[in-house]
Amino acid sequence: MSVILQVHFPFDGPFGDEMANAMAALAESINQEPGFIWKIWTENADQKLAGGIYLFDTRTNAKAYCKMHTARLEAMGITGISAAILDTNTALSAINKGPFDSTTA
């Protein structure tokens, strides 16, 4: 079973294309994390929030990444970080076109 890590935090920007340009190297580095499968980047410029929804192969890998990422954000001066590790229900997600296949179920 795959595991979701959901992280959100206050963020003053940049957002949109500027964020994509500024965070491209970080995005590439995330691909190298143990057990990482995919990430959906999230942002809300009006509410000054950013974060992401990650899929990991195990709860252990999700927890390890969450610990490292939280420390990285805190080192950047970011507080108010919200993180949750959740199991996936792939049967129901499949009904709603969830991005799972036999390698991520």
Image (cartoon, grey):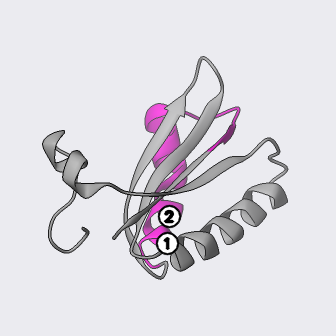
Total tally of numbered discs in the picture:
2
Say what amino acid the circle numbered 2 marks.
Ala
How far across and down, in percent of the image, does residue 9 sit?
A: 68, 41
Marks 1 & 2, CB-CB < 8 Å contact: yes
User: Is residue 42 a member of the stretch shown in magenta?
Assistant: no
Secondary element type, mark 1: helix
Q: Nearer the viewer, residue 64 or 18?
A: 64
Residue that badge 1 annotates:
29
Residue that badge 2 annotates:
25
Q: Main secondary structure of the magenta part?
A: helix
Q: Quadrant of residue 63?
A: bottom right
Q: Residues within 10 Å of mark 1 (few under 14, many from 20)?
A: few
Question: Residue at horizontal 46%, vertical 33%?
Answer: 16
In the rendered view, would you say 8 is above or below 101? above
How far across and down, in percent of the image, does residue 51 sit?
A: 57, 44
Going by the image, does 79 lie left or right of 46? Answer: right
Question: Residue at horizontal 15%, vertical 71%?
Answer: 102
Q: Which residues are magenta?
A: 8-32
Question: Residue at horizontal 46%, vertical 61%?
Answer: 27
